[in-house]
Amino acid sequence: MTNLNKKALIEALLFVSGEPVGIKDINRVTELSEDEISPALHELVEEYRERNGGCLIVEVAEGFRFVSNPEYASWIRKLKKSTTSSRLSMAALESLSIIAYKQPITRVEIEQLRGVNSDGVVKSLLEKRFIKILGKKEVPGKPLLYGTTREFLQYFGLKDLSELPTLRELQRDDSL
């Protein structure tokens, strides 16, 4: 298979997936070696970036996926007219940020930081699959421990948790 055909195959897989696709996933489906996949994938990423079209291929949540070019976000929003069901409430965003930075964390610990009951918010975040149960804390009562999911990374366009802004960066943004 030529390099052009490999890139076209990988491009097609990314296009139809709708989810981030990892190199191992491509390997499993195509039986191409990781040494063949990685350079072809990175060439594709670079080609889409250089052409500056309406779509890009980006690395997100331990995989690669097609995304729209942020340059055209305002028109895309007009077309999509975002539904409220895909939006997160302030309470959900607040709880999600606590979970992302403090994980693994219990519901009681979330509530202590927020100062309000978080049962409904935690349930909603579980239903949206932004958080998951990681296990139980080894203390009396064995409360559930929560952490973020791949869907969380995907929703916020993060490769991994290390891409979350630091407290210092957040404080700098507040001062602007």
Image: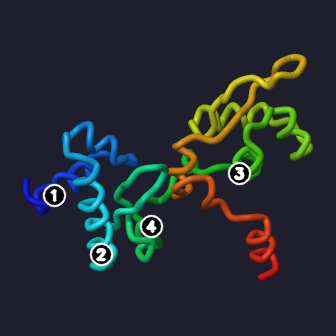
Determine the image quadrant of residue 36: bottom left
Quarter of the image with the C terminus is: bottom right
Identify the residue under disc 1. 8
Ranked by sequence position, the earlier of labels 4 and 3 is 4
Q: In this view, does 85 lie to the left or right of 39?
A: right
Where residue 30 appears, x then y in whole percent? 19, 41
Q: Which amino acid type corresponds to the residue marked 1 in the rendered image?
A: Ala
**Disc 4 residue type (three-letter):** Lys
Q: Where is residue 107 in the image (x, y as percent from the top left)?
A: 81, 33
Q: Give me the C-alpha separation between circle 4 and circle 2.
A: 19 Å
- Residue furthest front in the image: 35
Which of the two discs, 4 and 1, labels the residue nearer the N terminus? 1
Residue bearing mark 3: 93
SS of the residue under disc 4: helix
Is residue 25 placed above or below 52 in the rendered structure?
above
Q: How many labels does the image show?
A: 4
- Residue matched to label 4: 78
- Tell me which numbered mark, 3 or 2, is placed earlier along the sequence: 2
Q: Which residue lies furthest to the bottom in this view?
A: 176
